[in-house]
Image: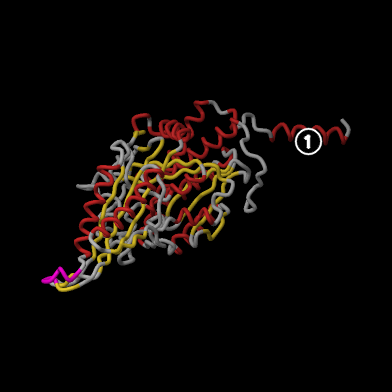
């Protein structure tokens, strides 16, 4: 054999040996169904579980409010560095975007929010909040730990990724709408779908719950100043009483849902603030009222908003008062309804069913809570679901936003594995269906 022929033979042999015997696109349905269970087994390994718990507890001890999550963001970047995962920082002040995979489309995202609440923790344990008046009472510390856990799983199994996974570490979900700011800063560039998890301390461990279509309501706030003419309480005829006017306004507002809304179209309107005078014998010049309103469709939401303004101004005028109404401020923005994509719901049922069994996948009723995850869903397909983290040792599990809120950390592997499994299956299905986009470029970071 000549020297040149030998070189050619070695080259051909190299090509043959370097080609995988079977690619991920050849995975059988049985092999695909094993991925979620394999990921869960990986996440349950002692070293992985202990690491996630440690991350969660570090964040829990140092809760930070919206757009102030600097230490949380720093911890996330340190963990990504250790895993060799490239990222963008900052977005939306403290947000981080990580990238795993080929750097080519399709791009699919998984998201965790990072911010805490203005609340004093009442749970006595070794990792209680060290920041007075601040607490992770909605599970965002667990969300971050699970997304980092998913990142570790995906980085270890990136040969399965037929595209690119984008990790969204998002600030300021609690009222500030950090998702909106992330979008404005370009986080959704090239991303075609996104998944999000929220812990649920009333749902048993090993169960998930979600639904197709509306899952959480759109929410807004209103504040009205009703102005009259102050005076002595003993001679009301010389005054124009804004307290009486505000009382009539509140009664009339309650009729908007009971008399004007379709009974099958759930809506809520609650007046939760009423500030008037400060003396027993003085009619004040003005009264301030405020509250929240919620609906499951943008159409119903906007109709309710319009009628709130009309009723407040109209009823105030009946009582000879003037009224001004405001609906949005820097720290109180409208959240759209959270609406799950029907095709992603089918994917969720398959993946979660493979991991937890059909009995562990629950169909839930819509909730009147709200989530800024909905801003992503206004732009691209999205899917949001609840993960069971009930603490069976607690006498009475506390709801989110309670100072007694606590989670079952045994649920962290489930969230990490579900995050990872959802995007692997999404990319596999997209690859199998063929390209759906053109003109994309790989992220420069990759």
- Vertical arrangement, residue 194 with respect to residue 308, above or below: above
Magenta range: 233-239
The chosen color scheme is secondary structure
Q: Nearer the viewer, residue 420 or 19?
A: 420
Q: Nearer the viewer, residue 57 or 319?
A: 319
At horizontal 35% and vertical 45% (from top left) the residue drawn is 295
In the image: residue 190, left or right of residue 110: right
Where's residue 423, x and y in %?
A: 51, 40
| Count of numbered labels shown in the rendering | 1
- Kindly indicate the quadrant of the structure image that contains residue 291: bottom left
Where's residue 232, x and y in %?
A: 15, 73
- From this viewpoint, is residue 37 visible? no
In the image: residue 287, left or right of residue 221: left
Q: How crowded is the residue under tag 1: few (<14 C-alpha within 10 Å), some, or many (20+)? A: few
- From this viewpoint, is residue 344 visible? yes
- Vertical arrangement, residue 26 with respect to residue 166, above or below: above
Q: Which residue is mark 1?
A: 11
Quadrant containing the N terminus is top right
Where's residue 399, x and y in %?
A: 27, 49
Q: Nearer the viewer, residue 127 or 318?
A: 318
Where's residue 169, x and y in %?
A: 47, 53
Is residue 236 magenta-colored? yes
Is residue 107 magenta-colored? no
In the image: residue 283, left or right of residue 257: left
Q: Residue furthest left?
A: 234
Q: Nearer the viewer, residue 39 or 429?
A: 429
SS label for mark 1: helix
């Amino acid at each position: 054999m000549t020297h040149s022929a030998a070189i050619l033979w070695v080259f051909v042999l190299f090509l043959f040996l370097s080609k995988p015997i079977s690619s991920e696109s050849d995975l059988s349905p049985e092999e695909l169904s094993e991925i979620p269970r394999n990921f869960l087994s990986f996440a349950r390994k002692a070293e992985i579980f202990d690491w996630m718990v440690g991350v969660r507890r570090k964040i829990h001890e140092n809760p930070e409010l919206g757009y102030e999550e600097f230490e949380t963001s720093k911890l996330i970047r340190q963990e990504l560095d250790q895993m060799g995962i490239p990222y963008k920082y900052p977005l939306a002040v403290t947000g981080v975007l990580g990238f795993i995979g080929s750097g080519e489309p399709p791009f699919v995202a998984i998201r965790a929010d990072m911010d805490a609440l203005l609340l004093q923790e009442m749970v006595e344990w070794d990792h209680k909040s060290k920041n007075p008046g601040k607490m992770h009472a909605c599970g965002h510390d667990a969300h971050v730990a699970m997304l980092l856990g998913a990142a570790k799983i995906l980085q270890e199994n990136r040969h399965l990724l037929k595209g690119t996974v984008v990790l969204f570490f998002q600030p300021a979900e609690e009222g500030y709408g950090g998702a909106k700011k992330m979008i404005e800063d370009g986080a959704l560039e090239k991303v075609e779908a996104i998944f999000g998890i929220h812990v649920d301390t009333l749902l048993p461990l090993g169960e998930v719950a979600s639904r197709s279509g509306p899952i959480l309501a759109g929410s807004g706030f209103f504040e009205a100043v009703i102005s009259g003419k102050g005076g002595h309480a003993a001679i009301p005829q010389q005054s124009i009483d804004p307290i009486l006017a505000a009382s009539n306004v509140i009664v009339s507002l309650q009729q908007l849902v009971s008399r004007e809304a379709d009974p099958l179209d759930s809506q809520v309107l609650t007046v939760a603030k009423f500030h008037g005078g400060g003396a027993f014998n003085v009619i004040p010049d003005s009264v301030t009222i405020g509250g929240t309103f919620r609906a499951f469709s943008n159409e119903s939401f906007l109709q309710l908003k319009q009628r709130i303004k009309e009723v407040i101004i109209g009823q105030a005028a009946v009582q000879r008062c003037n009224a001004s109404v405001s609906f949005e401020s820097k720290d109180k923005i409208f959240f759209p309804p959270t609406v799950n994509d029907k095709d992603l719901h089918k994917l969720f049922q398959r993946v979660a069913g493979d991991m937890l069994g059909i009995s562990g996948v629950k169909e839930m009723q819509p909730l009147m809570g709200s989530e800024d995850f909905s801003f992503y869903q206004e732009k691209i397909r999205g899917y949001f679901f609840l993960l069971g983290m009930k603490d069976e040792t607690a006498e009475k599990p506390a709801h989110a936003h309670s100072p007694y809120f606590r989670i079952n950390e045994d649920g962290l592997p489930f969230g990490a594995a579900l995050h990872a499994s959802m995007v692997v299956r999404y990319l596999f299905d997209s690859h199998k269906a063929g390209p759906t986009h053109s003109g994309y470029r790989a992220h420069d970071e990759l």
